[in-house]
Amino acid sequence: MKTETIEYSQDGTTLEGYLAYGDAVQGKGPGILVLPAWNGIDDYARKRTEMIAELGYIAFAADVYGKGIRPQGFADAAAEAGQYRANLPLLRARVAAGLDILRKAPGVDPAKLAAIGYCFGGQAALELARSGADILGVISFHGALDTPTPADAKAIKARILALHGADDPYVPAEVVQAFQQEMRGGMVDWQMTAYGGAVHSFTDWNAGTDNSTGAAYNEKADRRSWVAMQAFFNEIFSPPIGL
């Protein structure tokens, strides 16, 4: 496994992303953009990026907040993410800047790109799709599904996979229904899986296991969603990695 910290910029703001790829990567292959949860690029985000690379992909964790801006604690993270939730054009621009770095990375086939995101990063990944980005697929893990611009679904080129905690109090049933209607209205190639007994942050092993808090790790949902991600990649990247 090889990893690099990569400094880049968006409209004058310095950003710092994290690239991971395997020693065995040869020729050109798929690239996966990883969009972290609202803590930004932390140990969890780096580990997930490395796990993607271990599957044979080139993975790049994009920095939305800026170099050195790494929230500490719930209130700090909520405030930082809130700035971008309230300014979707800026969020899309930051994500697009990360995608551009991935597209140009050595070993990446620019025709084989996808994005995944966790929580806040799930929303960021979906907004990348809604922007009309030329990528093959987007996966949201327990991400925010709402958007003030549902008509933008008509611009989506990517296939969409939403992996959702069925008991997530932060993304309630009415938001899920609105998302599904948005996807239908945009004629999007989409699929959604809801994991019973799972709440928000079900893939985050640092989130504890108390569902009553609204955000908790769920080992089954984490494992099943990881398998679902791999199946989705095998579908959009033909032939699959290793074949």
Image: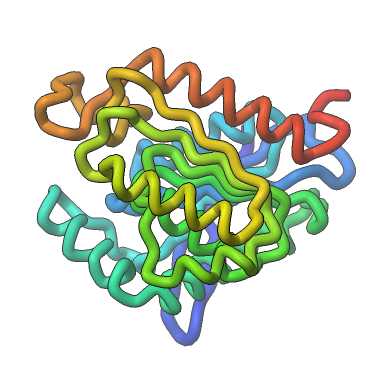
Identify the residue shown where x is 86% and y is 38%.
26
Residue 75 in which image quadrant: bottom left
Residue 17 visible in the current orientation: no
Identify the residue shown where x is 31% and y is 64%.
68
Q: Is residue 170 above or below residue 14?
A: above
Q: Is residue 233 left or right of residue 148?
A: right
Q: Is residue 235 above or below residue 153?
A: above
The foreground one among 175 and 1 is: 175
Identify the residue shown where x is 40% and y is 73%.
88
Residue 70 visible in the current orientation: yes
Q: Quadrant of the C terminus?
A: top right
Residue 41 percent coordinates (x, y): 38, 50
Residue 149 percent coordinates (x, y): 44, 71
Q: Is residue 19 left or right of residue 22?
A: left
Q: Is residue 139 above or below residue 210?
A: below
Figure coloring: rainbow
